Image (cartoon, rainbow, N blue to C red):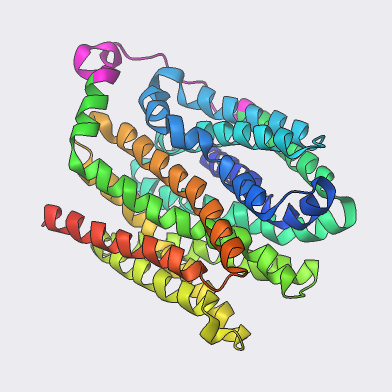
Amino acid sequence: MAREHLIILAGIIAAMHQGKLPPAIPALEAALSISLIEAGFLLSLVQLAGMTVGLFMGLAADKIGLRKSLLTGLIIIMLASFAGGFSTHVATLLVCRAMEGLGFLLIVLPAPGLIRRLVAPQLLSRRLGLWGCYMGFGTGFALLLGPWFIEHFGWANWWWLLSVLTLVVTVLIVQKIPPDPVEQTAHSTPEHGWQSRLQLTLKAPGPWLIAIIFAMYSSQWLSVVGFLPTLYAQAGFSGGMVGVLTASVALINVTGNFGGGQLLHRGVLPQHLLFGGFTIMAMGSVLTFGSATESWPVLRFVAVLCFSAVGGMIPAALFSLAMQVAPSENTVSTTVGWMQQWSSFGQFAGPPLVAAVAVGVGGWQWTWAVTGSAALVGILLARVLSARLA
């Protein structure tokens, strides 16, 4: 296995930890007596670290060392997942999920820089395209395997299995990825200082626009995919079928990530991908959850597949735009950290809001109003961004 593929594998493992919870929600409701809104917070609390310190982790990535950051994140996730499997109360599980969020952030922020360090320039765009698929792959695998595993071995063993897999990846990275190079003295000069980069980033409108747009995307995607296992279980599907249906929705997101990168390579403007992605997400959520399609389950499933697949173009577009709107070459990682922070905020806020609406109206039929509103804001902000780039 190529060294850069190990970095991508680390991202997939981190995403599996994010995706391990949705299939376990019915089991956790029975074992720990959690409510639907508490389940929403369990889905979103993994984003707490990214929501609060994403920008500063982006600032500090070079100082910490990319490899060291990645390994630290893997160890945190491994230990938090191991401890989480012993939880007998929802509060303990919430704390462990928050720690997993910190580990996730320490993995995904330095990973693109590590890939850039390890591959030849002519291969970089393709490898970064593969990296963009880590979330869909990891979440999809977790959603596919989780229901079957939990049904046969229990949710705690599911947590411990992923902890062991994380340990294996950690050992491989220690063995195969070379240590971080000695810090260059240029990084400590005043013009490269973190205060200067922070001010440049936060004073520029571009990083704010792409960051909030990312939040509008991530809030929709996690809200819909995160509650699909619960939705399908309530509809009477078996655990295995729930896993297949939900994993299909998560995995097809990879086609959007990859396809968006190919379209960008062929000259399609990233803002056009934003318009198309948000429009299809809005339409898909209306068809998936609207009461008018209640008797059309096949149409609903096709709609949610389109929601995830076409929406997957949005992250590819935003990472491309980050290179354009960063105020200087030295603020790209800071801009990406700011974007990650808002993405985490969207994932933190979306599921509890959708759960609260579902509880308030007694069903999922108004979910589209929440996700559709986020899509509309995304389209409006994309128009502002497009006008600034024109």
- Across and down, in percent, residue 229 comes to 68, 64
Going by the image, does 95 lie left or right of 388? Answer: right
In which quadrant is the N terminus drawn?
A: top right
Left or right for 278, reference 367: left
Q: Please tell me in which quadrant of the rendered image residue 331 appears.
A: top left
Corner quadrant of residue 114: top left
44 or 62: nearer the eye? 44
Q: Residue at x 52, y 36 (%)?
A: 48
Residue 114 visible? The answer is: no
The residue stretch that appears in magenta: 174-195
Residue plotted at (22% across, 26% down): 199
- Judge whether 329 appears above or below 317 on screen: above
Residue at image location 48% in from the left, 48% down from the top: 349
Can you say whether 368 is above or below 50 in the image? below
Front residue (pair 232, 355):
355
Residue 215 included in the magenta stretch of the image = no
Residue at left 29%, top 19%? Answer: 194
Quadrant in the picture for residue 362: bottom right
